Image: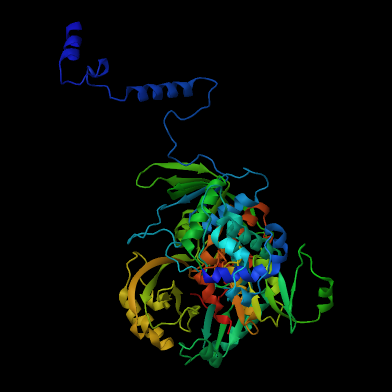
């Protein structure tokens, strides 16, 4: 044995690995292994904290007070307000589970609708609560750095363009538009009504054929950079102690109890106890014990709700009422037109659902159109259908703005709307039967601009049990069962 | 160099009386006379950089005192005096419409603008070098659209092209 050791040491050119690799069965990383084994033995000693005898730091925590499913703008907004409104610091443990942390523009899957959004904000809605939400959100965005400032991090620059929003209405919608504007004025929005002559004077590039009335928001309306808001929220939320985790929710562990309502009916109430969070590209999952689950999964909220058993029952009953949110593909096109409208262009929303806005100083415009029910594109992938622009969007654009005849499409992308098939307005609040699942989804394209307000409303619901500032009770889940539609006049 | 020289000269007319004590320089030059004949002070400041720097410093001090100026209809500017307080005749003018407001260098912000917006006859507004005036504040100016004729935003660091794009309301 001694001779062998000498031979190993004296032979030149051979790496002297020492005793430990003599038999070839040991690995090179001996020291790390030793400390690992030491840690495991320490775990098992009495008096020490019982940790798992293997490393689990890549898994989400085993317990969390609130689990927010979906890490888009709505999920992060709810997390932010939960942490902001909690009674003492560190009172609530929040875990945000997001399917795809990169949010990158992949052709085949994109979990979040925040990235590809056009980023507009306006107060011209027909539901008063939507106007209030918009007003709160614009005040939040104006003072964004007071809310979202993190030490040592750069300031959030929203690049807000206060260019206003112009809604055009035809003869038959003119009366509705007028009453909406009155309501908006009462809520404090600064909107003015314009006749076709005034429109032509103000915006000479508009062709006012077919327009009976237009409403123009003059202040606090425009568009901003959604991504910078999202990044700012993420930084702030992480600094407040919220855990962001990348994974997929595959199962809920629930318990049910039979209860009797005041009218004597038997009803089954469910409570979610654990959420199974599965790690991406792996079969491993972690059951997270939680007391409140918030469904902010955007376009995928319907699937998450089905996991909780919402909608499994006879149709027409409360148990059988599904969450009617499904992903709908929408295209946004970017085009260049040097003869197009000038710098004063607001976000123009035409009568038939075509909208566009300016982008930057270089005659670029962003726009798109909400297709009708029959023309819905296939939501299984995110491929852009360029014919859609040629056939459906461009003719209307030329009709409204003749100078767009010479436009050239530079690029296009697609994103999902968390489309509420029932009435295209969001769902907020707890589910009547699954008592600890709260919704914050289904806003069908308005989620981004209302996100601060919705986040605060859901946080108030979770922490206080009622809405303290903006009363969002028209947005409860019950309306799907009671068939009461909360229709918005026009959605973009 | 001609422009800064002229500027200094205008300021020089006001404080040259005081400067006499500092420099011992004799005559004060009126703007038109000074073009032909240089004063000793100007000669000195041409040749000595620290004299020029001192003149600029004193000018800055003078400017920072006359921050907030209002001009009422058909009247001249009403300025704050050296200690920053307004003259008492100011209170007599409550009914008179305000025509011009010079708020350069003021730390006015979005909330403060709401005091300026009810001035329906305002013709000229100067917001030069206001550090907190940004695009949101410009979005509020549409209420003054009918009367405002001059608007000055020189030197506002937070105003960007997006705010300027919404000035189309002002005719």
Instruction: Give the residue displayed 35% in from the left and 22% down from the top.
Output: A31
Q: Position of residue A249 (x, y in %)?
A: 45, 50
In the rendered view, does A336 fall on the left or right side of A463?
left
Left or right of B101, for residue A16? left
Residue drawn at x 62%, y 51% is A84
Q: Position of residue A456 (x, y in %)?
A: 62, 58
Q: Residue at x 56, y 75 (%)?
A: A487
Please state which of residues B31 and A429 is positioned toward the viewer in this rendering: B31
Q: Quadrant of residue A14?
A: top left
Quarter of the figure with the N terminus of chain A: top left
Q: Where is residue B48? Give x, y as percent.
A: 56, 57
Instruction: Residue B46: name its quadrant.
Output: bottom right
User: Residue A13 location in percent, x, y?
Assistant: 15, 21
Above/below status of A17 relative to A321: above
Coloring applied to the structure: rainbow
Q: Nearer the viewer, residue A97 or A192?
A: A192
- Residue sitting at 42 percent across and 78 percent down? A372
- Whether residue A12 appears in this view of the structure is yes
């Amino acid at each position: 044995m001694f001779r062998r050791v000498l031979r190993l040491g004296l032979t030149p050119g051979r790496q002297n690995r020492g005793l430990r690799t003599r038999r070839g069965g040991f690995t090179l990383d001996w020291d790390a292994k030793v400390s690992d084994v030491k840690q495991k033995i320490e775990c098992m000693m009495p008096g020490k904290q019982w940790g798992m005898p293997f490393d689990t730091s890549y898994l989400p925590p085993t317990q969390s007070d609130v689990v927010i499913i979906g890490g888009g703008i709505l999920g992060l907004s709810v997390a932010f307000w939960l942490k902001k409104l909690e009674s003492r610091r560190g009172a609530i443990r929040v875990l945000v589970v997001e399917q795809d942390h990169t949010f990158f523009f992949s052709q085949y899957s994109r979990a979040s609708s925040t990235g590809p959004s056009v980023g507009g904000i306006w107060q011209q809605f027909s539901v008063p609560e939507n106007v209030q939400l918009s007003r709160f959100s614009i005040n939040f965005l104006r003072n964004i750095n007071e809310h979202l400032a993190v030490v040592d991090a750069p300031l959030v620059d929203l690049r807000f363009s206060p260019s206003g929003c112009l809604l055009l209405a035809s003869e038959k919608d003119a009366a509705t538009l007028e009453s909406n504007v009155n309501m908006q004025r009462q809520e404090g929005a600064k909107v003015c009504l314009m006749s076709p002559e005034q429109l032509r004077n103000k915006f000479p590039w508009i062709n006012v054929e077919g327009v009976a009335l237009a409403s123009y928001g003059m202040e606090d309306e425009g568009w901003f950079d959604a991504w910078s808001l999202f990044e700012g929220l993420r930084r702030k939320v992480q600094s407040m102690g919220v855990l962001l985790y990348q994974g997929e929710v595959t199962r809920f562990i629930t318990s049910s109890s039979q209860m009797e309502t005041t009218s004597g009916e038997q009803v089954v109430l469910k409570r979610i106890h654990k959420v199974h969070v599965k790690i991406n590209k792996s079969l491993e999952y972690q059951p997270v014990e939680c007391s409140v689950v918030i469904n902010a999964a955007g376009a995928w909220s319907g699937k998450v709700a089905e996991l909780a058993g919402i909608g499994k029952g006879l149709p027409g009953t409360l148990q059988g009422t599904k969450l009617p949110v499904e992903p709908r593909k929408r295209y946004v096109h970017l085009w260049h037109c040097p003869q197009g409208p000038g710098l004063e262009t607001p976000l123009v929303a035409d009568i038939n659902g075509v909208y566009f806005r300016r982008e930057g100083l270089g005659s670029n415009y962003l726009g798109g159109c909400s297709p009708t029910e029959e023309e819905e594109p296939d939501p299984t992938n995110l491929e852009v259908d360029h014919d859609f622009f040629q056939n459906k969007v461009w003719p209307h654009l030329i009709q409204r703005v003749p100078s767009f005849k010479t436009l050239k499409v530079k690029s296009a992308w697609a994103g999902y709307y968390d489309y509420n098939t029932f009435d295209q307005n969001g769902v907020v609040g707890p589910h009547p039967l699954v008592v600890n699942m709260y919704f914050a989804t289904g806003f069908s394209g308005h989620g981004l601009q209302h996100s601060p307000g919705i986040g605060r409303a859901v946080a108030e619901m979770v922490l206080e049990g009622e809405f303290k500032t903006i009363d969002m009770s028209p947005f409860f889940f019950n309306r799907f069962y009671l068939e009461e539609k909360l229709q918005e006049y026009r959605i973009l | 160099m001609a422009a800064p020289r002229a500027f200094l000269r205008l300021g020089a007319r006001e404080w040259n009386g005081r400067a006499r004590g500092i420099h011992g320089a004799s005559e004060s030059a009126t703007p038109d006379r000074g073009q032909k004949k240089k004063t000793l002070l100007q000669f000195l400041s041409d040749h000595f950089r620290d004299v020029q720097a001192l003149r600029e410093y004193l000018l800055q001090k003078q400017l920072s005192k006359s921050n907030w100026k209002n001009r009422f209809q058909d009247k001249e500017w009403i300025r704050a005096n050296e200690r920053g307080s307004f003259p008492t005749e100011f209170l007599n003018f409550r009914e008179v419409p305000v025509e011009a407001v010079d708020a350069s260098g003021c730390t006015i912000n979005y909330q403060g603008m709401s005091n300026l917006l009810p001035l329906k006859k305002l013709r000229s507004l100067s917001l030069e070098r206001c550090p907190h005036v940004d695009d949101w504040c410009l979005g509020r100016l549409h209420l003054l659209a009918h009367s405002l004729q001059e608007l000055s935003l020189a030197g506002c660091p937070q105003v960007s092209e997006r705010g300027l794009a919404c000035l189309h309301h002002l005719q």
